[in-house]
Image: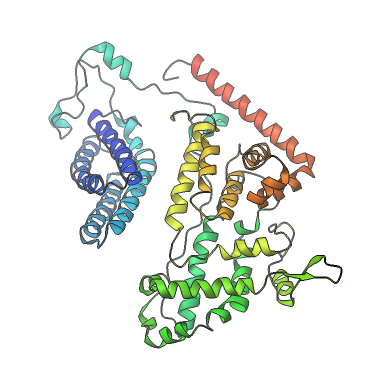
Protein backbone atom coordinates (compact mmCIF):
# COMPACT_ATOMS: atom_id res chain seq x y z
CA UNK A 1 0.00 0.00 0.00
CA UNK A 2 3.00 2.30 0.19
CA UNK A 3 2.77 5.49 -1.87
CA UNK A 4 6.46 6.26 -1.34
CA UNK A 5 5.62 9.36 0.74
CA UNK A 6 6.20 8.45 4.41
CA UNK A 7 3.76 10.90 5.96
CA UNK A 8 0.92 9.64 3.77
CA UNK A 9 1.88 6.04 4.42
CA UNK A 10 1.86 6.70 8.17
CA UNK A 11 -1.61 8.24 7.86
CA UNK A 12 -2.81 5.16 6.05
CA UNK A 13 -1.36 2.93 8.76
CA UNK A 14 -3.32 4.99 11.26
CA UNK A 15 -6.49 4.32 9.26
CA UNK A 16 -5.84 0.57 9.42
CA UNK A 17 -5.48 0.83 13.19
CA UNK A 18 -8.79 2.74 13.35
CA UNK A 19 -10.53 0.01 11.37
CA UNK A 20 -9.18 -2.72 13.66
CA UNK A 21 -10.02 -0.85 16.86
CA UNK A 22 -13.53 -0.06 15.68
CA UNK A 23 -14.12 -3.67 14.64
CA UNK A 24 -13.24 -4.86 18.16
CA UNK A 25 -15.38 -2.12 19.72
CA UNK A 26 -18.40 -3.16 17.68
CA UNK A 27 -17.89 -6.80 18.59
CA UNK A 28 -17.75 -5.85 22.27
CA UNK A 29 -20.49 -3.16 22.01
CA UNK A 30 -18.15 -0.56 23.50
CA UNK A 31 -19.98 2.73 22.92
CA UNK A 32 -17.15 4.77 24.42
CA UNK A 33 -14.62 3.40 21.92
CA UNK A 34 -17.08 3.86 19.05
CA UNK A 35 -17.49 7.53 20.00
CA UNK A 36 -13.73 7.97 20.26
CA UNK A 37 -13.28 6.36 16.83
CA UNK A 38 -15.71 8.82 15.30
CA UNK A 39 -13.81 11.77 16.78
CA UNK A 40 -10.56 10.21 15.58
CA UNK A 41 -11.97 9.86 12.10
CA UNK A 42 -12.93 13.53 11.98
CA UNK A 43 -9.39 14.48 12.97
CA UNK A 44 -8.03 12.08 10.35
CA UNK A 45 -10.12 13.62 7.59
CA UNK A 46 -9.11 17.20 8.37
CA UNK A 47 -5.38 16.55 8.68
CA UNK A 48 -4.74 13.75 6.20
CA UNK A 49 -6.59 15.19 3.23
CA UNK A 50 -4.84 18.52 3.64
CA UNK A 51 -1.42 16.84 3.71
CA UNK A 52 -2.26 14.60 0.80
CA UNK A 53 -3.51 17.38 -1.45
CA UNK A 54 -0.36 19.43 -0.80
CA UNK A 55 1.76 16.44 -1.82
CA UNK A 56 -0.30 15.99 -4.98
CA UNK A 57 0.14 19.69 -5.80
CA UNK A 58 3.92 19.43 -5.33
CA UNK A 59 3.98 16.40 -7.67
CA UNK A 60 1.86 18.17 -10.33
CA UNK A 61 -0.55 15.24 -10.22
CA UNK A 62 -2.90 15.64 -13.23
CA UNK A 63 -5.93 14.16 -11.49
CA UNK A 64 -5.82 16.46 -8.46
CA UNK A 65 -9.21 18.10 -9.06
CA UNK A 66 -11.02 14.76 -9.28
CA UNK A 67 -9.13 13.49 -6.27
CA UNK A 68 -10.21 16.52 -4.23
CA UNK A 69 -13.84 15.75 -5.12
CA UNK A 70 -13.43 12.25 -3.68
CA UNK A 71 -12.04 13.75 -0.49
CA UNK A 72 -14.92 16.22 -0.28
CA UNK A 73 -17.51 13.46 -0.72
CA UNK A 74 -15.88 11.32 1.98
CA UNK A 75 -15.68 14.30 4.35
CA UNK A 76 -19.38 14.98 3.82
CA UNK A 77 -20.22 11.38 4.74
CA UNK A 78 -18.12 11.53 7.90
CA UNK A 79 -19.70 14.80 9.06
CA UNK A 80 -23.15 13.35 8.38
CA UNK A 81 -22.31 10.27 10.45
CA UNK A 82 -21.04 12.49 13.26
CA UNK A 83 -24.25 14.51 13.23
CA UNK A 84 -26.41 11.38 13.31
CA UNK A 85 -24.34 9.89 16.11
CA UNK A 86 -24.69 12.99 18.29
CA UNK A 87 -28.49 13.00 17.85
CA UNK A 88 -29.05 9.21 18.08
CA UNK A 89 -31.77 8.28 20.54
CA UNK A 90 -30.39 4.97 21.81
CA UNK A 91 -27.23 2.88 22.17
CA UNK A 92 -28.57 0.55 19.50
CA UNK A 93 -28.86 3.43 17.03
CA UNK A 94 -25.36 4.58 17.90
CA UNK A 95 -24.00 1.08 17.35
CA UNK A 96 -25.66 0.95 13.92
CA UNK A 97 -23.89 4.20 13.03
CA UNK A 98 -20.64 2.58 14.19
CA UNK A 99 -21.27 -0.32 11.82
CA UNK A 100 -21.87 2.09 8.94
CA UNK A 101 -18.64 3.90 9.78
CA UNK A 102 -16.71 0.61 9.89
CA UNK A 103 -18.02 -0.35 6.45
CA UNK A 104 -17.19 3.13 5.15
CA UNK A 105 -13.60 2.88 6.36
CA UNK A 106 -13.08 -0.56 4.83
CA UNK A 107 -14.52 0.60 1.53
CA UNK A 108 -12.24 3.67 1.57
CA UNK A 109 -9.22 1.49 2.28
CA UNK A 110 -9.88 -0.77 -0.69
CA UNK A 111 -11.47 1.52 -3.24
CA UNK A 112 -9.60 4.76 -2.57
CA UNK A 113 -6.16 4.04 -1.15
CA UNK A 114 -5.39 0.92 -3.18
CA UNK A 115 -6.94 2.23 -6.40
CA UNK A 116 -6.56 6.03 -6.29
CA UNK A 117 -3.74 6.99 -3.93
CA UNK A 118 -1.28 4.53 -5.45
CA UNK A 119 -1.59 6.35 -8.79
CA UNK A 120 0.91 8.93 -7.51
CA UNK A 121 3.60 6.35 -6.79
CA UNK A 122 5.28 6.61 -10.23
CA UNK A 123 5.53 10.39 -9.71
CA UNK A 124 7.32 10.19 -6.35
CA UNK A 125 11.06 10.75 -6.89
CA UNK A 126 13.43 8.09 -5.58
CA UNK A 127 15.93 9.87 -3.34
CA UNK A 128 18.86 8.66 -1.26
CA UNK A 129 17.85 8.23 2.36
CA UNK A 130 20.51 10.70 3.50
CA UNK A 131 19.29 13.56 1.26
CA UNK A 132 15.57 13.92 1.88
CA UNK A 133 13.51 16.46 -0.01
CA UNK A 134 13.10 19.70 1.96
CA UNK A 135 9.95 19.50 4.09
CA UNK A 136 8.53 22.84 2.96
CA UNK A 137 8.35 21.62 -0.64
CA UNK A 138 5.87 18.93 0.44
CA UNK A 139 3.71 21.16 2.62
CA UNK A 140 4.47 19.42 5.95
CA UNK A 141 7.32 19.40 8.40
CA UNK A 142 7.87 15.62 8.12
CA UNK A 143 6.57 14.77 4.67
CA UNK A 144 9.21 12.98 2.65
CA UNK A 145 11.51 12.52 5.65
CA UNK A 146 12.86 9.00 6.24
CA UNK A 147 11.96 7.20 9.48
CA UNK A 148 15.64 6.50 10.10
CA UNK A 149 18.61 8.29 8.46
CA UNK A 150 20.70 5.12 8.32
CA UNK A 151 20.88 3.60 4.81
CA UNK A 152 20.51 0.03 6.12
CA UNK A 153 17.10 0.61 7.66
CA UNK A 154 15.94 2.62 4.66
CA UNK A 155 16.94 -0.28 2.42
CA UNK A 156 15.09 -2.77 4.61
CA UNK A 157 11.92 -0.70 4.47
CA UNK A 158 12.09 0.01 0.74
CA UNK A 159 9.19 -1.32 -1.30
CA UNK A 160 10.06 -4.06 -3.76
CA UNK A 161 8.11 -4.01 -7.00
CA UNK A 162 7.64 -6.78 -9.52
CA UNK A 163 6.06 -6.90 -12.92
CA UNK A 164 4.32 -10.26 -13.20
CA UNK A 165 3.07 -11.97 -16.35
CA UNK A 166 -0.55 -11.10 -17.27
CA UNK A 167 -1.80 -14.62 -16.52
CA UNK A 168 -0.66 -14.22 -12.89
CA UNK A 169 -1.98 -10.72 -12.24
CA UNK A 170 -5.30 -11.92 -10.86
CA UNK A 171 -3.44 -13.65 -8.03
CA UNK A 172 -2.38 -10.21 -6.80
CA UNK A 173 -5.90 -8.73 -6.77
CA UNK A 174 -8.97 -9.33 -4.65
CA UNK A 175 -11.59 -11.37 -6.42
CA UNK A 176 -14.47 -9.46 -7.96
CA UNK A 177 -18.09 -10.50 -8.39
CA UNK A 178 -21.57 -9.05 -8.83
CA UNK A 179 -23.28 -7.79 -5.68
CA UNK A 180 -26.86 -6.60 -6.38
CA UNK A 181 -28.04 -3.69 -4.27
CA UNK A 182 -31.45 -2.93 -2.81
CA UNK A 183 -33.31 -0.27 -4.84
CA UNK A 184 -34.18 3.07 -3.28
CA UNK A 185 -37.42 2.90 -1.22
CA UNK A 186 -40.61 4.03 -2.92
CA UNK A 187 -43.40 6.19 -1.56
CA UNK A 188 -46.61 7.83 -2.75
CA UNK A 189 -48.82 4.73 -2.46
CA UNK A 190 -52.49 5.06 -3.27
CA UNK A 191 -53.68 3.09 -0.23
CA UNK A 192 -52.50 1.66 3.07
CA UNK A 193 -52.85 -1.88 1.69
CA UNK A 194 -50.44 -1.13 -1.14
CA UNK A 195 -47.94 0.49 1.23
CA UNK A 196 -48.06 -2.47 3.62
CA UNK A 197 -47.64 -4.95 0.75
CA UNK A 198 -44.66 -2.98 -0.58
CA UNK A 199 -43.07 -2.80 2.89
CA UNK A 200 -43.40 -6.56 3.35
CA UNK A 201 -42.05 -7.23 -0.14
CA UNK A 202 -39.09 -4.93 0.49
CA UNK A 203 -38.21 -6.71 3.72
CA UNK A 204 -38.36 -10.04 1.83
CA UNK A 205 -36.35 -8.61 -1.06
CA UNK A 206 -33.51 -7.62 1.24
CA UNK A 207 -32.99 -11.28 2.06
CA UNK A 208 -33.42 -12.59 -1.48
CA UNK A 209 -31.25 -9.89 -3.09
CA UNK A 210 -28.47 -10.70 -0.65
CA UNK A 211 -28.44 -14.30 -1.89
CA UNK A 212 -28.41 -13.23 -5.57
CA UNK A 213 -24.70 -12.30 -5.71
CA UNK A 214 -22.68 -14.29 -8.22
CA UNK A 215 -19.32 -14.46 -9.96
CA UNK A 216 -19.50 -14.39 -13.79
CA UNK A 217 -16.03 -15.95 -14.00
CA UNK A 218 -17.09 -18.98 -11.94
CA UNK A 219 -18.80 -21.48 -14.22
CA UNK A 220 -21.01 -24.01 -12.43
CA UNK A 221 -22.65 -26.75 -14.46
CA UNK A 222 -25.67 -27.00 -12.16
CA UNK A 223 -28.37 -24.29 -12.06
CA UNK A 224 -28.35 -21.92 -9.05
CA UNK A 225 -30.55 -22.64 -6.05
CA UNK A 226 -33.91 -20.91 -6.25
CA UNK A 227 -33.24 -18.15 -3.73
CA UNK A 228 -30.29 -16.95 -5.86
CA UNK A 229 -32.52 -16.24 -8.86
CA UNK A 230 -34.21 -12.88 -9.60
CA UNK A 231 -36.76 -14.83 -11.63
CA UNK A 232 -37.75 -16.83 -8.55
CA UNK A 233 -38.06 -13.60 -6.54
CA UNK A 234 -40.56 -12.24 -9.05
CA UNK A 235 -42.61 -15.44 -8.98
CA UNK A 236 -42.43 -15.55 -5.19
CA UNK A 237 -43.93 -12.05 -4.93
CA UNK A 238 -46.81 -13.19 -7.11
CA UNK A 239 -47.42 -16.14 -4.78
CA UNK A 240 -47.34 -13.88 -1.70
CA UNK A 241 -49.94 -11.55 -3.22
CA UNK A 242 -52.20 -14.46 -4.09
CA UNK A 243 -51.96 -16.63 -0.97
CA UNK A 244 -50.55 -14.64 1.94
CA UNK A 245 -51.69 -11.02 1.82
CA UNK A 246 -55.41 -11.93 1.93
CA UNK A 247 -54.79 -13.74 5.22
CA UNK A 248 -52.92 -10.75 6.68
CA UNK A 249 -55.78 -8.39 5.71
CA UNK A 250 -58.22 -10.51 7.70
CA UNK A 251 -56.78 -9.07 10.93
CA UNK A 252 -59.02 -6.47 12.54
CA UNK A 253 -55.98 -4.68 13.96
CA UNK A 254 -54.57 -4.23 10.46
CA UNK A 255 -57.84 -2.72 9.27
CA UNK A 256 -57.97 -0.35 12.26
CA UNK A 257 -54.41 0.80 11.63
CA UNK A 258 -55.19 1.55 8.00
CA UNK A 259 -57.65 4.25 9.10
CA UNK A 260 -55.21 6.04 11.40
CA UNK A 261 -51.86 5.53 9.67
CA UNK A 262 -50.33 8.40 7.67
CA UNK A 263 -49.55 6.12 4.77
CA UNK A 264 -49.59 8.93 2.19
CA UNK A 265 -46.35 10.40 3.58
CA UNK A 266 -44.53 7.13 4.33
CA UNK A 267 -42.31 5.06 2.07
CA UNK A 268 -41.91 1.28 2.11
CA UNK A 269 -38.72 1.43 4.20
CA UNK A 270 -39.96 3.85 6.87
CA UNK A 271 -43.19 1.86 7.29
CA UNK A 272 -41.52 -0.46 9.80
CA UNK A 273 -40.37 2.46 11.96
CA UNK A 274 -44.02 3.32 12.65
CA UNK A 275 -45.15 -0.22 13.39
CA UNK A 276 -45.03 -1.21 17.06
CA UNK A 277 -44.18 -4.65 18.40
CA UNK A 278 -47.81 -5.65 18.78
CA UNK A 279 -48.64 -4.90 15.17
CA UNK A 280 -45.39 -6.54 14.02
CA UNK A 281 -46.61 -9.69 15.75
CA UNK A 282 -50.01 -9.42 14.07
CA UNK A 283 -48.37 -9.16 10.64
CA UNK A 284 -46.08 -12.09 11.40
CA UNK A 285 -48.98 -14.24 12.61
CA UNK A 286 -50.87 -13.52 9.40
CA UNK A 287 -47.77 -14.29 7.35
CA UNK A 288 -47.16 -17.61 9.10
CA UNK A 289 -50.83 -18.58 9.03
CA UNK A 290 -51.02 -17.94 5.28
CA UNK A 291 -48.11 -20.30 4.64
CA UNK A 292 -49.35 -22.92 7.11
CA UNK A 293 -52.65 -23.03 5.18
CA UNK A 294 -50.70 -24.34 2.18
CA UNK A 295 -48.97 -27.21 3.95
CA UNK A 296 -49.50 -30.86 3.22
CA UNK A 297 -52.21 -32.46 5.39
CA UNK A 298 -51.45 -35.64 7.28
CA UNK A 299 -54.36 -38.06 6.78
CA UNK A 300 -54.94 -41.38 8.52
CA UNK A 301 -55.96 -44.22 6.21
CA UNK A 302 -58.40 -46.98 7.19
CA UNK A 303 -55.51 -49.41 7.67
CA UNK A 304 -53.96 -47.08 10.27
CA UNK A 305 -51.13 -45.76 8.08
CA UNK A 306 -50.58 -42.07 7.49
CA UNK A 307 -50.26 -40.27 4.16
CA UNK A 308 -49.90 -36.63 3.20
CA UNK A 309 -52.61 -34.98 1.15
CA UNK A 310 -51.80 -32.15 -1.25
CA UNK A 311 -54.17 -29.19 -1.14
CA UNK A 312 -55.24 -27.58 -4.43
CA UNK A 313 -53.60 -24.33 -3.26
CA UNK A 314 -50.25 -26.09 -2.82
CA UNK A 315 -50.48 -27.50 -6.33
CA UNK A 316 -51.10 -23.98 -7.61
CA UNK A 317 -48.15 -22.67 -5.58
CA UNK A 318 -45.90 -25.31 -7.12
CA UNK A 319 -47.00 -24.23 -10.60
CA UNK A 320 -46.40 -20.54 -9.85
CA UNK A 321 -42.86 -21.12 -8.55
CA UNK A 322 -41.69 -23.39 -11.36
CA UNK A 323 -38.71 -21.94 -13.32
CA UNK A 324 -39.19 -20.90 -16.93
CA UNK A 325 -36.38 -23.32 -17.90
CA UNK A 326 -34.47 -25.97 -15.95
CA UNK A 327 -31.35 -23.80 -16.19
CA UNK A 328 -33.01 -20.75 -14.57
CA UNK A 329 -32.90 -22.16 -11.04
CA UNK A 330 -33.34 -25.37 -9.09
CA UNK A 331 -36.24 -25.83 -6.66
CA UNK A 332 -37.46 -29.04 -5.06
CA UNK A 333 -41.04 -30.23 -5.22
CA UNK A 334 -42.44 -27.89 -2.60
CA UNK A 335 -43.36 -29.56 0.68
CA UNK A 336 -43.70 -28.53 4.30
CA UNK A 337 -39.95 -28.06 4.78
CA UNK A 338 -39.79 -25.61 1.88
CA UNK A 339 -42.80 -23.71 3.21
CA UNK A 340 -40.91 -23.27 6.48
CA UNK A 341 -38.08 -21.80 4.40
CA UNK A 342 -40.50 -19.36 2.76
CA UNK A 343 -41.83 -18.37 6.19
CA UNK A 344 -38.30 -17.49 7.36
CA UNK A 345 -37.96 -14.76 4.71
CA UNK A 346 -40.03 -12.22 6.67
CA UNK A 347 -39.11 -10.87 10.07
CA UNK A 348 -41.08 -7.67 10.85
CA UNK A 349 -38.94 -7.02 13.92
CA UNK A 350 -35.53 -7.37 12.24
CA UNK A 351 -33.96 -5.95 9.09
CA UNK A 352 -31.24 -8.50 8.33
CA UNK A 353 -29.58 -6.67 5.43
CA UNK A 354 -26.61 -5.13 7.25
CA UNK A 355 -25.98 -8.17 9.42
CA UNK A 356 -25.99 -10.52 6.44
CA UNK A 357 -23.56 -8.32 4.53
CA UNK A 358 -21.19 -8.14 7.50
CA UNK A 359 -21.27 -11.93 7.71
CA UNK A 360 -20.53 -12.14 4.01
CA UNK A 361 -17.57 -9.78 4.26
CA UNK A 362 -16.09 -12.11 6.87
CA UNK A 363 -16.65 -15.07 4.53
CA UNK A 364 -14.95 -13.18 1.71
CA UNK A 365 -11.93 -12.29 3.83
CA UNK A 366 -11.53 -15.78 5.28
CA UNK A 367 -11.91 -17.39 1.87
CA UNK A 368 -9.05 -15.36 0.42
CA UNK A 369 -6.86 -15.72 3.49
CA UNK A 370 -7.35 -19.47 3.72
CA UNK A 371 -8.29 -20.81 0.30
CA UNK A 372 -7.21 -18.28 -2.32
CA UNK A 373 -4.64 -16.09 -0.63
CA UNK A 374 -3.62 -12.78 -2.16
CA UNK A 375 0.07 -11.93 -1.91
CA UNK A 376 -0.61 -8.91 0.35
CA UNK A 377 -2.73 -10.84 2.87
CA UNK A 378 -1.94 -12.82 5.97
CA UNK A 379 -2.86 -16.48 5.87
CA UNK A 380 -5.81 -17.67 7.92
CA UNK A 381 -5.67 -20.95 9.84
CA UNK A 382 -6.99 -24.08 8.16
CA UNK A 383 -10.72 -24.48 8.73
CA UNK A 384 -11.38 -20.79 9.49
CA UNK A 385 -13.97 -20.41 6.73
CA UNK A 386 -15.67 -23.66 7.69
CA UNK A 387 -15.92 -22.62 11.34
CA UNK A 388 -17.33 -19.22 10.40
CA UNK A 389 -20.04 -20.82 8.27
CA UNK A 390 -20.93 -23.23 11.07
CA UNK A 391 -21.23 -20.30 13.47
CA UNK A 392 -23.73 -18.70 11.08
CA UNK A 393 -26.23 -21.41 12.01
CA UNK A 394 -26.49 -19.81 15.45
CA UNK A 395 -27.01 -16.27 14.16
CA UNK A 396 -29.60 -16.64 11.42
CA UNK A 397 -32.53 -18.85 10.48
CA UNK A 398 -31.04 -22.25 9.78
CA UNK A 399 -32.14 -22.24 6.13
CA UNK A 400 -30.14 -19.08 5.48
CA UNK A 401 -26.92 -20.63 6.68
CA UNK A 402 -27.58 -23.46 4.23
CA UNK A 403 -27.89 -20.90 1.43
CA UNK A 404 -24.81 -19.03 2.66
CA UNK A 405 -22.76 -22.17 2.03
CA UNK A 406 -24.17 -22.45 -1.49
CA UNK A 407 -23.41 -18.78 -2.23
CA UNK A 408 -19.78 -19.40 -1.35
CA UNK A 409 -19.79 -22.18 -3.96
CA UNK A 410 -21.44 -19.85 -6.48
CA UNK A 411 -19.01 -16.95 -5.93
CA UNK A 412 -15.65 -18.36 -4.78
CA UNK A 413 -13.71 -20.37 -7.38
CA UNK A 414 -12.08 -22.81 -4.94
CA UNK A 415 -15.23 -23.71 -2.96
CA UNK A 416 -15.87 -26.94 -4.81
CA UNK A 417 -18.39 -29.73 -4.29
CA UNK A 418 -15.59 -31.48 -2.41
CA UNK A 419 -15.63 -28.62 0.11
CA UNK A 420 -19.44 -28.80 0.29
CA UNK A 421 -19.33 -32.54 0.94
CA UNK A 422 -16.70 -32.11 3.64
CA UNK A 423 -18.70 -29.29 5.21
CA UNK A 424 -21.90 -31.34 5.48
CA UNK A 425 -20.06 -33.99 7.51
CA UNK A 426 -20.05 -31.56 10.42
CA UNK A 427 -23.81 -32.05 10.72
CA UNK A 428 -24.32 -35.79 10.92
CA UNK A 429 -22.89 -39.26 10.54
CA UNK A 430 -25.02 -40.12 7.52
CA UNK A 431 -26.81 -38.37 4.69
CA UNK A 432 -30.21 -38.39 6.42
CA UNK A 433 -28.81 -36.57 9.46
CA UNK A 434 -26.98 -34.08 7.28
CA UNK A 435 -30.06 -33.44 5.17
CA UNK A 436 -31.99 -32.46 8.30
CA UNK A 437 -29.62 -29.50 8.73
CA UNK A 438 -28.56 -28.78 5.14
CA UNK A 439 -31.38 -29.94 2.87
CA UNK A 440 -30.52 -27.72 -0.08
CA UNK A 441 -26.78 -28.35 0.00
CA UNK A 442 -27.37 -32.11 0.21
CA UNK A 443 -29.79 -31.85 -2.72
CA UNK A 444 -27.17 -29.94 -4.71
CA UNK A 445 -24.54 -32.60 -3.97
CA UNK A 446 -26.86 -35.41 -5.10
CA UNK A 447 -27.27 -33.66 -8.43
CA UNK A 448 -23.50 -33.13 -8.70
CA UNK A 449 -22.82 -36.85 -8.16
CA UNK A 450 -25.05 -37.64 -11.12
CA UNK A 451 -22.78 -35.54 -13.34
CA UNK A 452 -19.17 -36.84 -13.17
CA UNK A 453 -17.96 -34.06 -15.47
CA UNK A 454 -18.39 -31.66 -12.53
CA UNK A 455 -15.74 -33.47 -10.50
CA UNK A 456 -13.44 -33.58 -13.54
CA UNK A 457 -13.82 -29.85 -14.13
CA UNK A 458 -13.13 -29.06 -10.48
CA UNK A 459 -9.98 -31.20 -10.46
CA UNK A 460 -8.75 -29.45 -13.59
CA UNK A 461 -9.42 -25.99 -12.10
CA UNK A 462 -7.71 -26.93 -8.82
CA UNK A 463 -4.64 -28.23 -10.65
CA UNK A 464 -4.53 -25.04 -12.73
CA UNK A 465 -4.73 -22.85 -9.61
CA UNK A 466 -1.95 -24.76 -7.84
CA UNK A 467 0.22 -24.49 -10.94
CA UNK A 468 -0.32 -20.74 -11.17
CA UNK A 469 0.45 -20.24 -7.48
CA UNK A 470 3.66 -22.20 -7.89
CA UNK A 471 4.56 -20.11 -10.94
CA UNK A 472 3.93 -16.91 -8.99
CA UNK A 473 5.98 -18.09 -6.04
CA UNK A 474 8.90 -19.10 -8.26
CA UNK A 475 8.62 -15.90 -10.25
CA UNK A 476 8.87 -13.68 -7.17
CA UNK A 477 11.73 -15.72 -5.72
CA UNK A 478 13.78 -15.65 -8.89
CA UNK A 479 13.11 -12.13 -10.14
CA UNK A 480 15.18 -9.18 -9.08
CA UNK A 481 13.47 -6.02 -7.78
CA UNK A 482 12.32 -3.49 -10.39
CA UNK A 483 12.44 -6.03 -13.19
Q: Which quadrant holds residue 124?
A: top left
Give 98 or 474, whichever is nearer the viewer. Answer: 98
Residue 156 in the image: state x and y as whole percent: 32, 15
Give 51 or 199, whichever is nearer the viewer. Answer: 199
* Numbered circles on residues, count: 0
Q: Is residue 313 above or below residue 207?
A: below
Give 192 or 337, whichever is nearer the viewer. Answer: 337
Residue 364 as seen in the image, left or right of residue 74:
right
Give 127 or 301, whichever is nearer the viewer. Answer: 301
Residue drawn at x 45%, y 15% as measured from the top left: 480
In this view of the protein, can residue 15 be seen by the observer?
yes
Residue 472 in the image: state x and y as whole percent: 54, 23
Image quadrant occupied by the C terminus: top left
Q: How is the image coloured?
A: rainbow
Q: Which quadrant holds residue 426?
A: top right
Residue drawn at x 48%, y 68% as measured from the top left: 202
Residue 185 as seen in the image, left or right of residue 21:
right
Residue drawn at x 45%, y 58% as measured from the top left: 353
Image quadrant occupied by the N terminus: top left
In this view of the protein, can residue 438 be seen by the observer?
no
Q: Is residue 335 above or below residue 396?
A: below
Residue drawn at x 67%, y 34% as measured from the top left: 461
Taking the view exactly as shown, the residue that stands out farthest to the right is: 303
Residue 343 as seen in the image, left or right of residue 90:
right
Residue 320 as seen in the image, left or right of residue 41:
right
Residue 468 in the image: state x and y as whole percent: 60, 26
Amino acid sequence: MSTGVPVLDNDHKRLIVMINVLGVALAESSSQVIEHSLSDLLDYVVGHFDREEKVYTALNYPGLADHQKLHAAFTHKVKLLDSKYRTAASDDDRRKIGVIMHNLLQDWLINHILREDLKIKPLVPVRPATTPKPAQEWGHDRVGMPDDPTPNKAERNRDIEYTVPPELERLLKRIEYVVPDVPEPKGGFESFDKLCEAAINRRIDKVMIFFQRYNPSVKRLLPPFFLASPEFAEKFHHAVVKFIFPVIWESRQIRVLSTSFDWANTNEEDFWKHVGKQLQQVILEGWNSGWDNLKLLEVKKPDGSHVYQVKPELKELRDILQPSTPEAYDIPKIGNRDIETFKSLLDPAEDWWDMLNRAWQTCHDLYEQEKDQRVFQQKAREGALRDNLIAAFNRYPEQWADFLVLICHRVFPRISTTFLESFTRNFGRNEAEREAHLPYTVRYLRQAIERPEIARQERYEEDEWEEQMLMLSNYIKNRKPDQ
